[in-house]
Image (cartoon, helix red, strand yellow):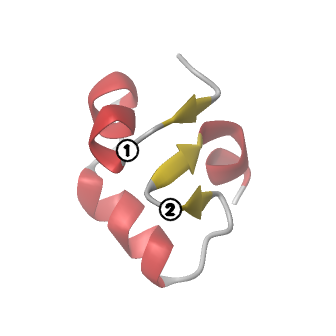
Amino acid sequence: MQEEYPTFKACSDATGIPLAILQRARRQGCPALKDGKVALAAFLRW
């Protein structure tokens, strides 16, 4: 796994986290999701 993924889809494909979960987290203001990128460790801590 990578520390950061360039897109939600890339993160979802690599980690198995559903896109819907990533999109919901973005709507809720998760700071690990910026500019369509996913900082995985920060997202998991959130």
* Residue most extreme to the bottom: 28
Residue 7 tag number: 1
Residue 24 rendering spot, x and y as whole percentages: 38, 73
* Corner quadrant of residue 21: bottom left
**25 versus 22 height, above or below:** below
**29 versus 8 height, above or below:** below
Looking at the rendered structure, the number of numbered marks drawn on it comes to 2
Q: Give the class, few, some or many, for how many residues have Cα within 10 Å of label 2's Cα (few <14, many ≥20).
A: few
* Residue most extreme to the front: 35
Amino acid beneath label 2: Asp
Query: In the rendered image, which quarter contains the C terminus?
Result: bottom right
Secondary structure type for disc 1: loop
* Corner quadrant of residue 16: top left
Which one is in front, 34 or 25? 34
The residue that appears at 57% across and 20% down in the rendered structure is 2
Secondary structure type for disc 2: loop
Amino acid beneath label 1: Thr
Q: Residue under circle 2?
A: 35
Q: Is residue 41 left or right of residue 12?
A: right
